[in-house]
Amino acid sequence: MSSQLTASSGLQVINPGIFSLIQDAGRFGLHGIGLTNGGPLDSNAFRWANRLCANPQGCAAVEVTIGGLVLEATVDTTIAVTGASAPLTINGHACELWRSYSIQTGARIELGFATSGSRIYLAVAGGFQIEPRFNSVSTVPRESLGGLHGDGSPLQAGDMLPCESQRSTTPLSLAADLRPDYSTNRALLRVILGYQQALFSDLQKQLFFTSDYQVTDRSDRMGYRLKGTAIAPSADGILSEGICLGAIQVPADGQPIVLLNDRQTIGGYPKLGSVLSLDISKLAQLLPGATVNFEAISIEQAHNALMLDQQYFERCTPEEIVTND
């Protein structure tokens, strides 16, 4: 596959949508200098978008929140769109998600607004060719880092997303029964309890694991703030320490916060445990008002779930589609 990239070749942004960011697998190993991970909130939809384009895992793609993205191709290439259910048209023709399409120069790609779920991923063959900052192109707006221009800004009208010119390939599709269901308005999240569980009495933990929590409108890429039964740790704060993906902080008001990809690198609120990384994808697709429940699992169960998920992903083979497109 040859690459003929210039500042004027790729996918041009006609309308950036509500909030569209360039994301690759994320920025790792830099918490020591205060840089968080970034990366896709729904890692499952992200990796499938790349796989349907025959890309290595982790290639740069666009994460679209809610929808509204409109692009115009200035190269012949292949795209795939996965994630939340939203209308997709190419040159005015309705197209389904969770499959790849060969597109030609001049093609107009329009993504409507999500009807279930909230995060949509658009990948292109070979990934978007963007200069990395600190070993990643992931966009973290609050750190003014990454993305197309390197300054953490979301996509803007007139931006050009550089990508490779590619000959037409056989389209691939993920079978409908293998696609995630985003239509439910609730999620059960598995939690690995941490050493700070000692700050929570058995009664407080029982309340947490038997209560419904609602996603609030104060949720974003840093964390999902929940509202429900207040949990009271025995200490209001702790010495600041590093924070992992999915950490469940309990601030003074007792309302849990599940920290996500753009979280701060250190914090001083007590943490009950961490949501299993696999379940972050489910949480990140929920809109305000959705219901969240939690269940405790052991670290051995978490390891098994991660291994089984990777094996399942590798065994699932996209179907080839013979078309006259």
Image (tube, rainbow, N blue to C red):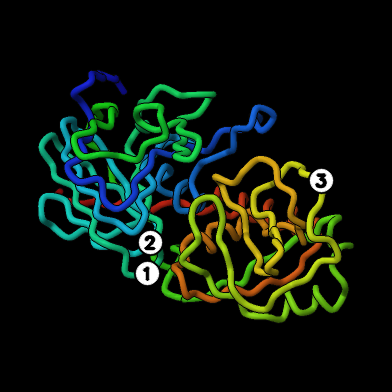
Q: Which residue is drawn at 58% across and 55% down?
A: 312
Displayed quadrant of residue 223: bottom right
Q: Which residue is drawn at 84% across and 67% down?
A: 200
Quadrant where the image shows the N terminus: top left
Tell me where residue 124 appears, x and y as whole percent. 32, 38
Asked whether the residues under the numbered discs 1 and 3 touch, taking CB atoms below 8 Å apart as contact, a structural biologist would say: no
Of helix, strand and loop, which one carries label 2? strand
Real-space Cα separation, disc 2 to disc 1, in angstroms: 6 Å
Q: Which residue is drawn at 41% across and 42% down?
A: 50
Q: In the picture shown, does residue 99 fall above or below 152?
A: below
Tell how many labels. Answer: 3
Q: Residue at x 61, y 56 (%)?
A: 278
Q: Name the residue under label 1.
A: 116
Real-space Cα separation, disc 3 to disc 2, in angstroms: 39 Å
Of badges 3 and 2, nearer the viewer stands: 3
Front-lying residue, 105 or 187: 187
Q: Mark 2 points at which residue?
A: 84
Asked whether the residues under the numbered discs 3 and 2 touch, taking CB atoms below 8 Å apart as contact, a structural biologist would say: no
Front-lying residue, 277 or 3: 277
Of badges 1 and 3, nearer the viewer stands: 3
Displayed quadrant of residue 246: bottom right
Q: Can residue 213 be seen in this view?
A: yes
Asked whether the residues under the numbered discs 2 and 1 touch, taking CB atoms below 8 Å apart as contact, a structural biologist would say: yes
Instruction: Indicate which disc, 3 or 2, sits on the residue closer to the N terminus.
Output: 2
Numbered tag placed on residue 194 in the rendering: none
Real-space Cα separation, disc 1 to disc 3, in angstroms: 40 Å
In the picture, measured across the screen, residue 283 lies left or right of residue 81, that is right
Q: What residue type is labelled 1?
A: Ser
Of helix, strand and loop, which one carries label 3? loop
Q: In the picture shown, does residue 34 fall above or below 1?
A: below
Q: Can residue 173 be seen in this view?
A: no
Numbered tag placed on residue 239 in the rendering: 3
